[in-house]
Amino acid sequence: MGGMDAEVGRDVAALDPDLLQLSEVSPLALKQSPEIAQGLYSQWLTLPETSRLVKSLIEDAKTGAPLNVPGSSNTTNAAAGTSLPSMFPAGSAPPLSPRSTSGSPRAVRRGAGTGVSSFGSPLKLVSEPMREVIPQFYFKYGRPPPKEMKEHCLSRIDHLFFAHMDGLQIHEFKSITKDICKLPSFFSSSLFRKIDVDCTGVVTRDAFVDYWVNSNMMTRDIATQIFTILKQPDRKYLTQEDFKPVLRELLVTHPGLEFLQGTPEFQERYAETVIYRIFYYMNRSGNGQLTLRELKRGNLIAAMQHADEEEDINKVLRYFSYEHFYVIYCKFWELDTDHDFLIDKENLIRYGNHALTYRIVDRIFSQIPRKFTSMVEGKMGYEDFVFFMLSEEDKSSEPSLEYWFKCIDLDGNGILTPNEMQFFYEEQLHRMECMAQEPVLFEDILCQMIDMIAPENESYFTLRDLKGNKLSGNVFNILFNLNKFMAFETRDPFLIRQEREEPTLTEWDRFAHREYIRLSMEEEAEDASNGSGDVWDESLEAPF
């Protein structure tokens, strides 16, 4: 019984006095004296009329009939005719004080709604929220172009096709590629063949409009456009083969590469080198499948646009520089003594005037940092050499840090411990002793490396530690490249000043520039010693 009384008490405490509908008692008096409301509520529950009302509502609920709840009618008469039974005898109730309909917040609240009785139901009348229409934001085949943009594009297309009602041939398609599509001009052949699926040799106006306008290609970003044009229909990535048509057209049309047209074998080597460089920097997963996300994250699109606008191809330092290709190929040629286009350990140990240790060369040929593509046991192919050389000469790049990190991480657990680093440094120490140089103990060099990198945990280095520091490349030079280690120790003021004057150049850019000058001077001296630059011994199979 006590629990029921407590429940009733909680109900009364939460009850709005207005909802009792007692004309004989002031709601203000009920609020000021909650015990009166509790007593009245208990007495009301015992009245016969209340019992009959509750039973009637229960029966209506069981049969599904509309509930005739007093006070919920929308008419004033209904509210008056079905009022709850009173607990005061007729005429014995004290008069109510006058109530202002304008000063009561409750009165304003009740009057705000339409069609609701002054003795309204405790259930709030909530209007149905308006349904907000969200505009479409995902388009599988690209966002449709705005009307004005589409009309302007069609007008320009009509102008270019006006004198070619039968369509354009492949050699006439460059203006469409560059002026309408805003793509590099050396994509002309690839775009043409993408539209001319039946290989008719002609692209009509309607065929171009269907591909470029109606399929919403024109509204996509340039990376997506290039990705769609180059990739095979059944794939979601680009392979090295997909770039070859673009490179072939670049070699034929770019003024800075005209001199190669008489040597098709070097045209092919140049194209291969550019593609290898693209995948070295862009394909971070290293699986040979360049995704759209990787293409967007890299700088290849900007480099392509630069190559299309710049007549001097050597000024396009990213990927396309002929001088950079020349340096890579000549280095490979120097090491490949039998010219079978393969390099073994003994060849690679001579790289950089015997700069590398045997232990690091063994790790490279164990194919831990990267699987070789040569398919010959114990041999490194040209593509493998390109990846090695780019990693060796620019240890500040992320692909290079990943390459050498895998080499030093002997157990493959993702951290470089002092024991692993000491294993490689021991050979460096021995070489310093053989060269009569003052050796630096590993304990001292380890402290120097920790100060240089400032790792999160001083007991080991992680790849994250190295990627977050501009001096990380020096760690690897200390461990396995004696020449660069000594150069770092001496701190050549000329090189330091050069780096400050040209901060946009990478370590690879500076190395390639120096090497190209050296190689070109050697070639000029060799030509002078032979008496003529036009005479060359075919048996030597010189690269140029």
Image (cartoon, rainbow, N blue to C red):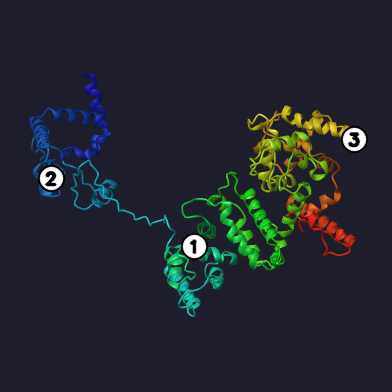
| Residue 318 visible (yes or no) | no
- The reply to whether residue 204 is in sight is yes
Mark number for residue 437?
3
Residues packed near mark 2 inside 10 Å, few (<14), some (14 to 19) or many (20 plus): some
Is 33 on the left-hand or right-hand side of 442? left
The residue wearing badge 1 is 194
User: Disc 3 or disc 2, which is closer to the eye?
Assistant: 3
Q: Camera-side residue: 24 or 504?
A: 504
Q: Secondary structure at mark 2?
A: helix
For marks 1 and 3, give the one nearer the viewer: 1
Q: Which residue is mark 2?
A: 79
Q: Residue at x 28, y 49 (%)?
A: 103
**Side of 148 relative to 350 (left or right):** left
Q: Position of residue 111 (x, y in %)?
A: 24, 51
- Circle 3: element type: loop
Q: Earlier in the sequence, mark 1 or mark 3?
A: 1
For residue 326, what is the image quadrant? bottom right
